[in-house]
Image (cartoon, rainbow, N blue to C red):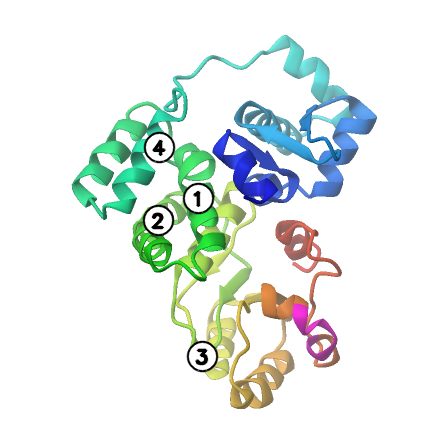
Amino acid sequence: MILNELAEEHGLYPIRTVAQMTGVNPITLRAWERRYGMIQPKRTAKGHRLYSLRDIEEIRRITDLLDQGVSIGQVSPVLEQHPPTSQPDIVHGDSWTDSYAHALARLDESALNALEAQALSMAQVNDVLAAYLLPLLDRLDRLRSHDLDREVQYRLLQTRLTQFLAQQVRILSATLPPARVLASTLPPERSMFALWRLAWTSLRAQLPLQVIAAGLSANQLTHAQHLAGYTTLVLLLDSEPPLAVMGTQLPLLVAADWSVLALGRYAHAKREELSALGIHVPPTEDESPLDFIRAHV
C-alpha cells in the first residue's frame, strides 16, 4: 500500500488531503506549525506530515477564528481559553468505517442507510462527509483503475455522496451572499459530483460558488454570466475535452467579461496551452484551489 492508504486506514491524513478537506493551503499549514506552534502533526520516518481527525478539527477552529477577525498571532491564546467541547466519535477502533466499507463491498444499500443514520445521529453531516465518507471515496478512486469490484463500489458511493453534497450545498448557500463565481465542466462531461464537491468545499470556507449544471456549452455559460453577473468562471478539467471543444468553446469563454480558471488533472497537464489562451491555472498542483479562486474573484 502507498503512504496515503496506510495513513488513512489508521485515521491519519497527508497534508494534501487535509488541504482539500479544510480549504487551507499546505504552505499555510506548515507556516502555522513553524511560526506559531499550532497543529503539530505526526511524522513518518521520511518526515511526511500526517494529521489526525483532532488536528483537522483544530484547523477548522482556527479558520473559524480568522473568519471572525481574530489575528493569527492571537489564535493560540483564544484556543487555550476555549478548549473544544467533546463530541461523540462515530468511529471506535475503525469499526464504523470497516462496517461501512464491508456493506459497500456487498452493495448492501440497506446496511449503508443504517450506518449513515447511525453516524448522523452522533455527528454533523458535513463532519461525516469530510472525515469519513469522502476519504473512503478517494481511497477507492486510487484503487479502482484495475479492480472492477472497487470500480463498482466507487460508483455506488459516488452516487450516494453526490446526493449528500448537493443537499448540503443548498443549505450552506442560503447563509452566504449571492455567488460571483460559477463552476462547470465542458461537454461531453455530465457528472455533477466534482462540481458539488467543489461547491461544498468552497461554501464551507465562506466562498460563495454557484453550480448550475455540468457540461454546459460556451453559449450557455456566457448567457448565465450575462444574467447573473458572475465575475469568475471555474472549469473543472479532469480529462481532455474533445478538440472541437478546445478549439471553439474555450476561446468564446475567454472572450467574455470574466476571469476563466481551470482546475483538475488535465488543467495541470496542459498549463502552458491553457495559459496561452488566457485561462488561469494554479502554478503548482499543491496550491489550494480555494486560495487560487479567491485570488481571481
Q: Indicate whether 260 appears above or below 77.
A: below
The reply to whether callout 2 and callout 1 are in contact (CB within 8 Å) is yes
Question: Do residues under tags 4 and 1 come within 8 Å of each other at their CB atoms?
Answer: no
Please tell me which of labels 2 and 1 falls first in the chain. Answer: 1
Q: Secondary structure at mark 3?
A: loop
Q: Amino acid at mark 2?
A: Leu
Question: How far apart are labels 2 and 1 at the CA level?
Answer: 8 Å
Which residue is rendered at x = 35% and y = 32% of the image?
98
Q: Which residue is mark 3?
A: 187
Label at residue 153: none
Question: Is any atom of residue 120 visible in this view?
Answer: yes
Amino acid found under the numbered disc labelled 3: Pro
Pointers 4 and 3 in contact (CB under 8 A)? no
Question: Does label 4 or label 2 sit earlier along the sequence?
Answer: 4
* Earlier sequence position, callout 4 versus callout 1: 4
Magenta-drawn stretch, dominant element (helix, strand or loop): helix
Amino acid type at circle 1 is Leu
Q: In the image, which disc is placed on residue 134?
A: 1
Is 47 magenta? The answer is no
The amino acid type found where label 4 is placed reads: Asp
248 w.r.t. 200: above or below? below
Q: Is residue 23 visible?
A: no
Name which of mark 1 and mark 3 comes first in the sequence: 1
